[in-house]
Every structure is written in structure tokens, then in C-alpha cells.
Image (cartoon, coloured by chain):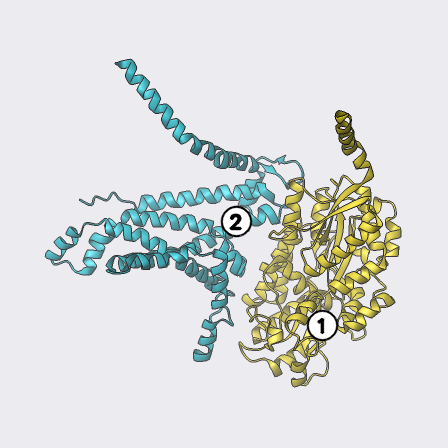
Chain colours: A yellow, B cyan
Amino acid sequence: MKRVIIISIFLFCFFVTPLIGEKITLWTAPNMYQEQFWKLILEEWKQVRPDIEVEWKTIPASGSSEEAILTAIVTDKAPDLCTNIFSGFAAQLIEADQLVALNTLEGFDELVQIRKADEGIKGWDFSGKYYVFPIYSNPMLFWWREDILAEAGFDSPPRTYSDVYKLAERFCKPKETYAIEYLKGRNWWDRWFDFITFYYAAGGGQSYIDVERNRAVFNNDAGIAVVEFGQRLFDEGWTSTDMMDNPLYTGHLAGQLMGPWSIPEAKNMFPEIFPEKIVMSYPPVPDDYPEDQPVKTFADTKGMVMFKNSKNKEAAWEFMKWVYSDPEHDRLWFEMTGLPPVRSDLSSNELFQAIIEENPMLELYAQAVPNSVPPALISKTTEVQDIMTTHLTEPIYLVDKSAEDIIKNCISKINKELF
Amino acid sequence: MKNKQSSLKRMNAIKGWTLISPYIVHQAIFFGYALGWLGYLMFVKWNYLTPPKWVGFDNFVRVFTDEVFWLVLLNTVNFMLYFIPIALIASIFLGMAFSKLKVFKTFVVLSFLVANISSGVGYSIVFQKLLSESGPINRFLFQQFDFTIPWFSRPQLAILAIALMVSWKFIGYYGLIFLAGLNAIPQSLYEAAKLDGATRWKQFTKITLPLLNPSLVMVLVLQITLSFGIFTEPYMITGGGPMKRTYMFMMYIYENAFRKFTSTGPGFASVISILAAGISFGCIFLVRKMVEKEVNMV
């Protein structure tokens, strides 16, 4: 009898249990607010679909999310689903044949429609296929100190480069106070948040890389204007690469490019400054930029992918569809993280209106989503932006060359890399 | 008798092999295997995700035609030009100062060694804050003399700043090596020189320096290996900039192996690592040829 019971348990464990439940793994960004969101979502999922268990983890600590994911793939420990994937990394994973083309799965088009992501997903087209489902799009906007602007005689944020120069003349003191932060740092990703953002604004959102021809294409009026803008700011001492910590909040800086992820931190750490003394605007544009034309900005956009080695693709797809087909989930995401979901109805849907009304600072970010442009879809993002750092942004303040020459040299280096 | 001797020899040999076998096994796994794998990687193109593809000497060609490789080599030489004399001179004088101490000698020597065991990340952040444009040194300079030193935003200053930081970390350790060398010099030599009327400078150049030769060579070898292996300080403080002038071999290897894995990857990085090792061995060989002398204390 004992034997029969043991054998029955054994058979049940090995043959029946897998039929009862499926298990998928999900990795999300190691971010406090996002973690809180996923915790709630997974609790709900447990009630809705107890047959599919989701094992959730944040992306393991490493130099970057990309390194952690890469290590997981190499050691055959990659999850079924993973968030926090940016376009360049997605392109690398696609090249290495690691991702599932989501548009080949049943119900993809319906999901895009339900999510109101028709526009947002266009930026994720890899040769007619979609491997990444966009989660959020963070437009970069300028935060200005309203009190500093008022003291300098501005009743609205500077719109053009000349306005910035005027502000600088009135506000800047050598080695003490600066007009704007022109360069963010020397990490490759910093180029998204300085040169590329300024370039998108100056050029009406035109790309810096021609993805079809695999060539850099910012050797135009917009590129030159952005470089000359930086040269003037550095020459006059109106900006610096080495400012003190949090210069905007300490009153040593008038304006700085920021993403919506800075809102919770600003609220918690500088309540005396944020939101009362902060006013937002699109990045400044060249003087001849048409006033009636909308200003474009860079969008730091991230999405979810499904790995090819997933053993439960169907279950993973079910979970992904469930998360993104309910606008209530996007409302919760927006409310908890402050990161605008990739939806075209963000400004019109009542669900999101309540959040925007409660956090007026989010309104501009939500409105900026349609005017924000994602990075170029190339697999050599790291290499290209590393070249930009050495041959484009650093020469702006270190090398005595014309903007045209700096750009020409940088373009030739990038094209050599992309060739 | 002969049989007894040979069996004793065999026993000794067995004992010897038994004693060194853990070391051999350890070296075979952690050095031999890794070196063999590195040797294989040099000839393949691999992105970790798809199977390695044999490319012959392509990785070598790519490294030699990569202008960054030559820039990194130049940066390493540039760094050595600052670091070697600064740390060497400072540590010789420190070693001499240690030897003159009558009380608290151990305490003082250990205090200088604290820098050597401190976390590279920690002290890099401290120096970064200290030398930044808004840091206390530059604030003082600006308030008193109306100028600041852009330590990290000018290429030569950035490499000098890193050399100074690394010197700060290592002079205690090198000073200890020189102290050991100084202690080995017989006092009778100085007494004889004094009787012959030799000045302090003469004693230093004719007795101290020549007899410190073994310590000098050792410190030089350590400095060269450190220059080729430096990572934390430039990575943390300057990120290899400005204009890639603080971009060193370890950063170059790391970034190509792990960050640019689809374009260059571990094959390319393996070639750089072998070349960096080869060049550093070459430098050590050259230094030993030029500086090393047989020293007889008696």
C-alpha cells in the first residue's frame, strides 16, 4: 500500500502537476516605484490566472541592466519576459537571434489597438517586425528655476538660444552660477540626454542616424546650430562640465534637462523648490526655428521583450497581453512611477486626467509624448554614442575647431564604425 | 646502499610532488585553463550568444588598425611618465624618513599603509569631490587667487590627477619596500664614508642609491604592472575622458569584451589583453636590463 501511495505521488508530481500550472519568469527594472507597481499587478494576476505562476525578480545588480541580462542569456538563466529594454540593446539581441517577434503571436495587432499604442510602436519597427512592446516613453524637458528667471526679467522660460544667452548675461557669475547644463556626463547614454535631445529640438525631430543607409546624418544646420550653441556657452563660462551636486536646487543653475523620473526625487528631497519654483519647457531651439512648429524632444523609451529560449511562450504572451490590455494597469503605472505609458490617449483619457490634475508637472510630460522621438534603432548604440562623446561633445569645449569641422570629423568616425 | 638511497630519493620526490600538487592543480584550473581559453578566443569572433566563429588573425588586424589601441598605449606611457617618478621619488624619501624614526616607527609605517588597503572606489570618490571645480581646493584657489584648476576636464591634468591619486595610495607600500632595502645596508659603509669626508649627498648617491638597487627594481616592476592594470580610478573619476586621454588598457578590454559585445567582443578583447601583457613584460624586461645590477653588501 505504501508503495502504491509513493508511486502515485511520484506520478502526480511528474505528470499531472505540469498540466495543472505553468510557470514563467519576469524581470523588471530595479526601481522602487516600478517594483511597487509590479507587486500589485502580480497579486491581481494570481487571482485572475492561478494556472500561470509568474516568478518575479528585479534585474540582478550589475554594471548595467544590459550586462545582467547578457550574463543571464549566456548562462541559460534568461527570464521569459523582461522589461527595461532600450532600442539599441533590443537591436543587439535581435541580431543575436534572442528575441521573439511579438507581431507573429496571435492577438498582437488587437493588443496594440487596445493599448492605443499604434503611434508609439512605430518607433520600434525592426525591418517590419516588432520584438519589443513599448511600456513607457519619457520625454526630456527643461526644468527652469522660476525665481531665477523672474529675477533675470523672464516671465516665461527661454525659447531660443538667444533667450538663453540673454538669461546667461543677466544671471551667470564666473565659476559660480551657470545658465544651463549643456553636457550631462561622459557615459555613452548621456548623449541621449544632451546632444541628441538638443538635436531633435533643433531639427524638428529628424534622426541623427539614417538607419536604412547606416550613416550618421547630423551634418546639417541643426547639428551645427547645436554645436555652436554649446561652444558659445562654454566659451563664455555660462555652462560647465563640473558643477556642484544638484545645482538647480541650490540655485547655481537656471535650467537643466530632466526626465519625469526626477519628479519623485525632487518632491522628496527638495520640497522647498519643487514644484513651486520650477517651470518646465521644451529644450531651447535655434533662433530661426518657426514659432508655430512644435518642438520635438528625445524620448527615453523602454519596453518588454520575450526571450526565444522561453519554454512557456504562450503563457508569457498571455501575461503580457493581460497586463497591457487593461488601461487601469497603465493608470496604476502612471500613478505609481510617474513615467508616461506609451498611449496616444494620455491627454484625453479621463483615467489619466485625474493623475495629471493631481500632479500638474506630469501634464507637460504627458503632452510631450507625441512630440518625443525615440533613439535611432541601431545595434551599435554604445559604440556610436561613445564616439559622439570623444569626437563631438568633448571637442566642443576642448578643441579650437569650427562646429562644421567637429561634426565632419565625428560623422566620419561614426560612419567608419557603422560600415 | 644504492637501493636505499634511490628509494629515499623517490620518497622525497613523492613528498615534493604531493606538497606542490594543490598549487599545480590550482594553477592549471585558474591560470592554465583561462590562458588556453584566452588563446582560443583570440582567433574567433564571438558575441557570447551564438557559437564562436573562427576568424584567424582578423582580431589582430582589427586591434592594430584600431586607433584607440594606440591611444591607450600612449595614455599608459603618459601615465607612467607622471606616476613612476612621482611615486618613486616620494617613496624613496618616505622610506628614508621611516628609517630615521626613533619612536612609533611601526605605527607610522602602518598609517601610510592604510591608503594602500583603502577601497579604490571610496578614495576615488573622495578625490573626485576634493578636486572638482566646486570642491574645497578649487573654491579656495578661486576665492584667494581668482583661478581654478580644471583637474578632470583637461586631458593632461586629468592624467596627472590620477597619477597623483595612485601615488598617494602606493607610496606607503613602496616606502616600506625601500625601508627594508635601507635596513639591509650596513651602517659601517656610511661610517667609513664619513671618515673619508663624504658629504650626505655623496653618501646618498654612492652608497644608498646603488645598494637600494634590488628594492628600486622591485618597485619599478610593480609600478609598470600597475600602470598596465589600472582600472578603478579612471573608470570611476573620468570614465576614460576627456578625449579618451585617461582611457587605459583594462577599461579598453572591459568595454570591448562586455559592452560592445556584438561589434568587437571577447575575441578582440583577448588580443588586447595578450598584447597588453606582452608590452608590460617587454617594459619590465627593458627596465631590468637597464637598471638591475648585482649588489654585494659586503
Q: Which of A328 and B52 is in front in this view?
A: A328
Visible in this render: residue A295?
no
In the figure, residue A255 lies in which quadrant?
A: bottom right
Residue found 52% across the figure and 60% down from its top: B238
Residue found 53% across the figure and 76% down from its top: A175
In the figure, residue A300 lies in which quadrant?
A: bottom right
Residue B111, image x and y in percent?
36, 59
Residue type, label 1 = Val
Q: What secondary structure is found at the residue carrying circle 1? A: loop
Residue type, label 2 = Phe
Residue pointed to by mark 1: A285
Left or right of B181 on screen, residue A274 = right
Residue A132, image x and y in percent?
77, 51
Mark 2, Cα crowd under 10 Å, few <14 / some 14-19 / many 20+, is some
Mark 1, Cα crowd under 10 Å, few <14 / some 14-19 / many 20+, is many
Residue B91, image x and y in percent?
33, 57
Q: In this view, does A291 lie above or below B286?
A: below
Q: Which of A326 and A165 is in front in this view?
A: A326
Q: Mark 1 lies on which chain?
A: A
Indicate the quadrant containing the N terminus of chain A: top left, top right, bottom left or bottom right. Answer: top right
Left or right of A392 on screen, residue A279 = right
Q: What secondary structure is found at the residue carrying circle 2? A: helix
Task: Tell me whether circle 2 and circle 1 mark residues in contact (CB < 8 Å).
Answer: no
Residue B102, image x and y in percent?
23, 60
Q: Residue B69 carries which label?
A: 2
Q: Which chain carries label 2?
A: B
Q: Which residue lies furthest to the front in this view?
A: A1
Q: How far apart are marks 2 and 1 (CA)?
A: 38 Å
In the figure, residue A311 lies in which quadrant?
A: top right
Q: In this view, does A374 lie above or below A226?
A: above
Evaluate whether label 2 is on the same chain as label 1.
no
Left or right of B292 on screen, residue B262 = right
